[in-house]
């Protein structure tokens, strides 16, 4: 049985398949290039024809679908209902909230012609939907009985990007955006926090196996129109931070701009307090950069569309039958398993599954079959220790446990990296230096606006503000808070 | 216990709730108005701020989500994978297929400015994605081994509408669009037919309880760029036809325009044969118009987000406890059940559930509780025969069977109406007359281009061409085919 490393790479790959993994640029050599290559070779995504847009290929989309499914279930558990608001927003809506329009104007795509005619009022393609949702909330919220109003939508949004990067920063992206209205500031804050922790943080840590830091943004980094922005930040394999999901308290800014008010139990009219919160296809990019290695993707088992691939070492009837039988047994026990009984080089097929990051690979050849065993290969471990033997009979009951081990291992590896590349510092200068390779933790009282300006000149920013124990602060003014500082995507 | 009909309508509805059902304009009086009112009062949807757009409210969206889930499962069973292609298409792509651009040009929305600048090439907001998918299929299809390529996407599309109507014809709508490439004309035709029957027709009849006619379109009514268009047509409550889903053989038109060719087993390059097929939020409108009555919606149980509502006749602790216990028992047996233990008029609450078309309602009051029974009310039956008594103990095991009876009854009622409003005719004049109230079946050899022109002058069209037994023709040239002629949405 040949391992991918010994597979001769001189043979021409057949059309539609990938060459050996060694064609990936090593991460240490050029991380952005590795990222681009792994997305192409694992058939995740490509650039769209219009600058900055993305084509998400079936394998990439199947990962997004599983993210959606899990996040959607959590959102519904938090009491919100899905709805759908239009792609097109009158330009005038954007202008009603001053900070909001200032924040988004440079990124807007504008429709000026439709149905063959020039439009009287230009239409904006939504960059986010606070304004249009605000307009309807104002109609739907009349009395305190109509609160809280908890809405979410899965949609595409458009923000024109000058430096696009697949999944991370694309001119069009897919996301969910939640929009809620509440009777009091406290309820709004509590709900934003609930979504942030129970939906985003839990999904990212428990399912995507990505350790995340939670905290709030400094005023400089807040969402345009928010009074508080909570963020989930994670360290990627190159030590840079990725902002993965954000939850905003919008105060009464949008309620004032759109007239979202209600008759209170006191018989008086009050402005509502609104929130918004979002997570996007950027999570797919985060998954790739948090777990991927020089051989390709590594998808955590709980998220993986394919958890186990059973590979026939040779295209042989008895082997193929055994492979299909095993896949069927695994499927029946609730494991997402597929077979690979294709013709063509075994090594090249294995390379494809490694590139695609399938958590667990079982290999069966004629000799294995005779001996009633298979080779089991864990994608979370280095190639030299990833393989072991397992008896065919044991497989169905062993696999679930191994998948959970892989899930935990990927989280642990990411956390170990994060900890090893994090530094406590006592000055802005040290923070900038530490951010060269990872995260710097600096007391918040050392970081004023001038310090943020100074860091920004080195492309370093405050990713979030949190308590020393990593929990969310109750307020901006709390004593002893810490800033996490890093370079970022 | 008061029935909705006897509920006093003089009391002012509390904010955010609906008035009694009698405020719906009867269907016979003004069907379009009934449609508009029922969508508003059942909180299904509203007009968006930009002309022709739609806001889908949570209840409407929850129905669409269940449609999506079922259709998506069927599409995957047919072997297609989901992917995502960009919203924005270069204008030049549209122009590559002559009929296609001619068909869609009048409906396009065009982005001319983005990121603060005027664009060099205007960008079209996708009206459908054959062109952009074609561009990528040309890259992904190289050899016969890459075929068939079976893709689907869930997306929004934009077609500027001069006479918009919620769900039926909106400037932006949500849909799935499948796009496939095959090695031969026969395989492409067979796949389009498989999708049409196993996905669309089966979903519509088995789940949405809508009897549909299948057939192909005349050249006049074909999709722009297709060589054959299959359609599912259904009769709405006013006797008009709704085209609910279509599947197109695109021949080699798009393969030629975008260069989708492959190396065959014969060592030669061949153009691929492509198909596309779609179903949209229009299905929600079809559901409303196929099943709704003067009291509101009637949602078939297999599709209903809420299958059973258990209503406390009075807000009383013992009653509320019994209601919640019943909902919990129903939920555990796999029934989608909710409780209504709200304060406020019983009659008005009942009216709301009738408007929303919940298939089955259970009512429990203090006296019922004492006698160990509930009132069970079927939404599919006329109000005067819809109610009966059932013992509380029997409910959990009886409900599933009753829901299936309701599912069948809704289908049967729609089919009976369709049959009673269908007429066999022998001339174009008779067809036009018969289409005043329903469907006319006319031998295809009587319908030439001039006849279609004549009918069009009376807003009557050939909805589909089929065999006399209702099955799909193998070819346009088959003898003895029949045209189904009607007015339509």
Image (cartoon, coloured by chain):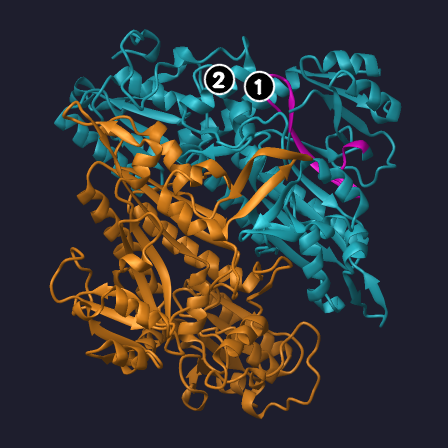
Chain colours: A orange, B cyan
- Quadrant containing the C terminus of chain A is bottom left
Q: Which residues are magenta?
A: B220-242
- Quadrant containing the N terminus of chain A is bottom right
Residue B156 drawn at (x, y percent): 56, 44
Relative height, residue B299 to residue A485 (above, below): above
Residue A272 drawn at (x, y percent): 25, 35
Do the residues at pointers 1 and 2 share their chain? yes
Q: Nearer the viewer, residue B342 or A363?
A: B342
Question: Which of the 4 image quadrants contains residue A427?
Answer: bottom left
| Circle 2 residues within 10 Å: few <14, some 14–19, many ≥20 | many
Residue A421 drawn at (x, y percent): 30, 81
Q: Nearer the viewer, residue A106 or B354?
A: A106
Q: CA distance from mark 1 to mark 2?
A: 8 Å
In the displayed orientation, state which residue is furthest to the front: A450
Q: Nearer the viewer, residue A228 or B146?
A: A228
| Circle 1 residues within 10 Å: few <14, some 14–19, many ≥20 | many
Relative height, residue A405 to residue A232 (above, below): below
Question: Which of the 4 image quadrants contains residue B317?
Answer: top left
- The numbered mark at residue A209 is none
In the picture of the structure, the residue carrying the numbered disc 2 is B293
Instruction: Indicate the secondary structure of the residue bearing disc 2.
Output: loop
Instruction: Indicate the secondary structure of the residue bearing disc 1.
Output: loop
N-terminal-most mark, 1 or 2: 1
Q: Are marks 1 and 2 in contact (CB under 8 Å)?
A: yes
Question: Which of the 4 image quadrants contains residue A324?
Answer: bottom right
Q: Residue at x 31, y 32 (%)?
A: A260
Residue A26: say if magenta. Answer: no
Which chain does tag 1 point to? B
Relative height, residue B197 to residue A315 (above, below): above
In the picture of the structure, the residue carrying the numbered disc 1 is B237
């Amino acid at each position: 049985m040949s391992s991918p490393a010994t597979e001769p790479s001189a043979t021409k790959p057949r059309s539609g398949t990938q060459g050996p993994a060694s064609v990936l640029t090593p991460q240490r050599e050029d991380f952005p290039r590795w990222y681009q290559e792994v997305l192409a070779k694992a058939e995740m995504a490509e650039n769209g024809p219009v600058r900055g847009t993305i084509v998400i290929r079936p394998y990439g989309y199947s990962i997004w679908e599983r993210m959606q499914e899990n996040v959607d279930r959590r959102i519904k558990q938090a009491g919100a209902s899905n709805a759908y608001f239009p792609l097109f927003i009158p330009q005038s809506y954007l202008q009603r909230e001053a900070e909001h329009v200032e924040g988004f104007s440079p990124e807007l795509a504008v429709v000026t012609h439709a149905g063959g005619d020039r439009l009287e009022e230009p239409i904006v393609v939504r960059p986010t939907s606070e304004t249009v949702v605000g307009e309807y909330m104002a109609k739907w919220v009349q009395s305190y009985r109509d609160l809280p109003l908890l809405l979410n939508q899965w949609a595409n949004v458009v923000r024109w990007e000058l430096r696009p990067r697949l999944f991370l920063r694309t001119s069009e992206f897919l996301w969910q955006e939640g929009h809620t209205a509440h009777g009091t500031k406290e309820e709004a804050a509590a709900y934003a926090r609930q979504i942030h922790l129970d939906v985003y943080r839990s999904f990212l840590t428990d399912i995507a196996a990505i350790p995340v830091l939670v905290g709030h943004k400094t005023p400089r980094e807040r969402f345009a129109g928010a009074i508080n922005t909570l963020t989930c930040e994670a360290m990627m394999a190159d030590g840079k931070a990725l902002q993965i999901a954000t939850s905003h308290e919008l105060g009464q800014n949008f309620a004032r701009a759109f007239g979202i008010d209600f008759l209170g139990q006191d018989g008086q009219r009050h402005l509502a307090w609104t929130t918004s919160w979002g997570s996007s296809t950027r999570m797919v990019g985060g998954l790739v950069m948090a777990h991927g290695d020089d051989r390709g993707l590594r998808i955590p088992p709980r998220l993986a569309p394919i958890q186990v691939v059973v590979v026939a070492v040779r295209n042989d009837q008895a082997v193929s039958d055994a492979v299909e039988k095993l896949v069927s047994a695994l499927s029946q026990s609730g494991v997402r398993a597929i077979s690979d009984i294709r013709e063509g080089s075994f090594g090249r097929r294995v390379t494809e599954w490694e590139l695609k990051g399938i958590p667990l690979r079982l290999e069966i050849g004629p000799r294995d079959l005779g001996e009633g065993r298979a080779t089991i290969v864990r994608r979370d471990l280095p190639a030299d220790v990833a393989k072991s033997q397992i008896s065919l009979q044991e497989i169905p009951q062993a696999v679930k446990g191994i998948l959970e081990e892989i899930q935990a291992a990927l989280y642990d590896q990411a956390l170990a990296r994060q900890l090893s590349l994090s530094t406590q510092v006592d000055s802005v200068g040290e923070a900038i230096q530490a951010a060269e390779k990872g995260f710097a933790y600096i007391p918040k009282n050392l970081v004023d606006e001038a310090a943020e300006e100074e860091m920004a000149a080195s492309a370093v920013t405050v990713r979030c503000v949190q308590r020393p124990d990593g929990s969310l602060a109750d307020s901006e003014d709390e004593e002893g808070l810490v800033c996490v500082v890093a370079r970022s995507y």
